[in-house]
Image (spheres, helix red, strand yellow):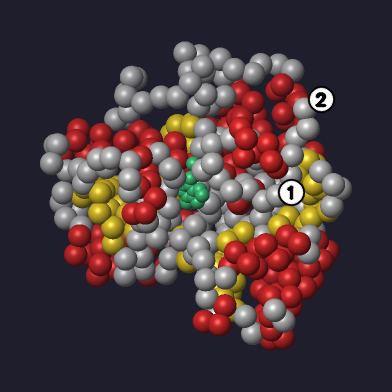
Amino acid sequence: MQQVNRALFDDVMVPNYAPAQMIPVKGSGSRVWDQQGKEYIDFAGGIAVNCLGHCHPALVAALKEQGEKLWHLSNVLTNEPALLLAKALVDATFAEKVYFANSGAEANEAALKLARRFAKDQFGEHKDQIIAFKQGFHGRTFFTVTVGGQPAYSDGFGPKPEAIEHAEFNNIDSLKALISDRTCAVMVEPLQGEGGVLPADVEFMQQVRALCDQHKALLIFDEVQTGVGRTGELYAYMGLGVTPDILTTAKALGGGFPIGAMLTTTAIAKHLVPGTHGSTYGGNPLACAVALAALNTVNQPDVLAGVKAKEQLFRDGLHQINEKYHVFATIRGQGLLLGAVLNADYAGKARDFMVAAAEEGLMALVAGANVVRFTPSLVIPDADIREGLARFERAVAKIVQG
Ligand SMILES: Cc1ncc(COP(=O)(O)O)c(C=O)c1O
């Protein structure tokens, strides 16, 4: 049998990723084991995806059950899991209509196309400007990556989609300077994830909503990272008191099975008539069956309250580490989307902390060069949080002591 090791990655994979040397082979709850049997506590959760940890029984059962019934049809036909999931999303949110995709980027692509089409139908071709925010992240298709607020990610691929501009996050004057009746949509993350775990101010979001209303622009919330319980609300908009016109969700929606969705109202949705947009796999029965189980499991008062309680455990633990080692300027974020921002002495070294954590048996993430990010399972046992923080403390000690 072919030996499977990290060297094979360099032989056969496109080099757009640089994965760690270890290869995980098994996961259960918030624990993961690699090929050598080394055990890790998972504070990364597949980048805010594994909302119920690894191999949660409800998700495994849903996958097995659907796997023995029906795998795929295409959108020439609808299917029961897709309809049930759409109904559950409509019942749980502001939305009246759902479009299924396979990833966050695809959900955002659909949202942006819908916004452009809606504006063209309602107001005419001139209303095409999309405003997003610096440091924002919306995916890697050419449209979504251009809407994202880091030009380096979209540079070097030829002519970019046009009429896209970027304002400063949490700076309403910066948006005011750009927005006009030519604006068809404003796309924003309620909490910038990849951009550094930076929550939006409530007042800022309310003003964004008001400016969108004033200029008849659609407000799109990208909740790909914040959605499905991550912030302690089912969706972050629910904690802001600001309702978007379109919301995108992916990552945790499938709990590890690829799926994305765009949610909106009937009045807006009706502009995507047959033939305007689509996807072969969107609404796949396996994905929808697993996502329905994930959504139903997360959308329980005790699970959502648990996220806020676990946030406090994390914050307390990280503050205690900081009192000893003085490495963080602040701890920010919401729920179980938390960022430990390194202080000036450790600026640019987030990756070193992540690597040191892995050596100690803890999977963590970064969000840019200065932020160590934690996005664990929403149901991670408190004992695993404590043990993971103890491992993180050992990693911090190693870095501080050189
Ligand atoms: C806010 C946000 N939007 C979109 C995406 C893209 O999602 P995907 O990688 O599933 O295409 C991400 C991924 O990190 C994200 O954090």
Q: Taking the image as drawn, is residue 313 in sight?
A: no
> Residue 375 location in percent, x, y?
63, 57
Count the numbered circles shown: 2
Q: Nearer the viewer, residue 94 or 339?
A: 339
Q: Is mark 2 within 8 Å of ligand 1?
A: no
Please tell me which residue lies in front, 190 or 34. 34
The amino acid pointed to by label 1 is Met
Secondary structure of the residue carrying numbered label 1: loop
Structural crowding at the residue carrying mark 1, measured as other residues with C-alpha within 10 Å and reported as few (<14), some (14–19) or many (≥20): some
Q: Position of residue 246 (x, y in %)?
A: 38, 44
Return the x and y of residue 214 as percentages of the image width and height. 21, 56
> How far is disc 1 from disc 2 in space, using C-alphas?
20 Å
Residue under the point 71% across and 21% down: 67
Residue drawn at 78 percent across, 68 percent down: 391
Q: Is residue 19 visible to the viewer in this orientation of the structure?
A: yes
Residue 337 occupies quadrant: bottom right
Q: Which of pointers 1 and 2 indicates the residue nearer the eye?
A: 2
**What is the residue that sits farthest to the right in this orientation?**
37
Using residue 82 as the reference point, say whether residue 115 is left or right of it.
left
Disc 2: which residue = 1
Determine which residue is flagged by label 1. 22
